[in-house]
């Protein structure tokens, strides 16, 4: 199973573009992608909080946040792409009939059309968004629910993500965890999260599954 933003797909360019539209419309200066991409892990609240230098609580209830979400929805998959090697990784899983799913905290309003544009919606055996259930990661409930949907025991599952909450959720669900360093967390931090494995590219995941390197496909 996979997280979405920062793990399968690089959604930062479109999210930061939406933030910059809001910033400019408010008379502020746009921020560079290389600066703001690290805010994406904190969602729309974190983008507004950091972009406007306000508190998290202020950002949560600010109309600026709603403006950002509307702008992002209107331009959901303009610059978003799968990370290098992800397409090949998922293709190998499909070829081997290894079921996979997606567990994200992203609301379904954005998850469903994004996965459709990325042509992943019909391939994932389970897709759980941030509002699919009563609790979200780092709670283990979404991962356990996804295991039931797919029909696989947690002990035979691996969860792959780019944030500490992914590792916490996986461990609470008794699922093996893989922390990736190409996402929106600080790469060095991933080694301190206690994941069962840490990988720096999608090419490093198949050996964990006992499969050959992607380059051999």
Image (cartoon, rainbow, N blue to C red):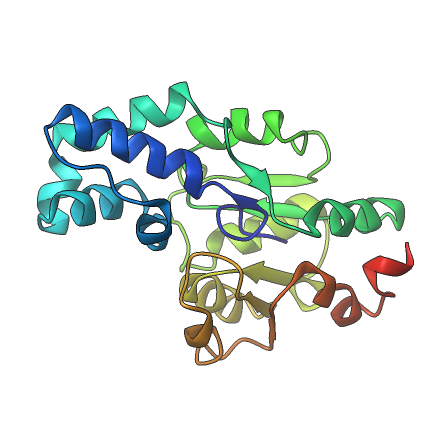
Left or right: residue 44 versus residue 133 is left
Locate residue 52, reporting x and y percent.
13, 43
Q: Is residue 99 above or below residue 186?
A: above
Determine the residue positioned at 47% across, 39% down.
Answer: 129
Quadrant containing the N terminus is bottom right
Residue 191 location in percent, x, y? 49, 79
Residue at (47, 61) in percent of width and height:
166
Number of marks in the rendered image: 0
Residue 127 location in percent, x, y? Answer: 58, 39
From this viewpoint, which residue is outermost toward the top? 74
Q: Is residue 110 left or right of residue 213?
A: left
Q: Residue at x 57, y 70 (%)?
A: 174
Of the pair 99 and 204, the residue shown nearer to us:
204
Picture coordinates of residue 69 (x, y %)? 30, 28
The image quadrant of residue 125 is top right
Instruction: Report the residue at 54% width, 54% height from top.
Output: 143
Q: Quadrant of the C terminus?
A: bottom right
- From the viewer's side, name the closer residue of 57 and 215: 215
Which image quadrant is residue 197 in? bottom right
Q: In the image shown, does 172 or 179 lie closer to the viewer?
A: 179
């Amino acid at each position: 199973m996979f997280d979405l933003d920062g793990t399968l797909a690089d959604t930062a360019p479109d999210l930061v573009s939406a933030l910059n539209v809001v910033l400019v419309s408010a008379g502020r200066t746009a921020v560079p992608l290389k600066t703001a991409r690290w805010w994406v892990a904190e969602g729309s609240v974190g983008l507004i909080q950091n972009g406007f230098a306000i508190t998290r609580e202020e950002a949560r209830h600010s109309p600026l946040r709603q403006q950002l979400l509307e702008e992002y929805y209107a331009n959901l998959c303009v610059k978003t792409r799968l990370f290098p090697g992800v397409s090949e990784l998922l293709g190998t899983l499909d070829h081997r009939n290894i079921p996979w799913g997606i567990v994200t905290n992203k609301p379904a309003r954005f998850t469903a059309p994004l996965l459709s544009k990325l042509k992943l919606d019909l391939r994932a055996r389970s897709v759980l968004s941030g509002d699919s259930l009563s609790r979200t990661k780092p709670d283990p409930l979404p991962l356990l629910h996804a295991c039931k949907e797919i029909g696989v025991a947690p002990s035979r599952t691996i969860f792959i993500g780019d944030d500490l909450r992914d590792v916490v959720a996986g461990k609470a669900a008794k699922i093996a965890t893989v922390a990736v360093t190409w996402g929106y967390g600080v790469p060095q931090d991933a080694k301190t999260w206690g994941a069962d494995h840490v990988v720096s590219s999608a090419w490093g995941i198949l050996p964990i599954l006992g499969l050959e390197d992607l380059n051999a496909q």
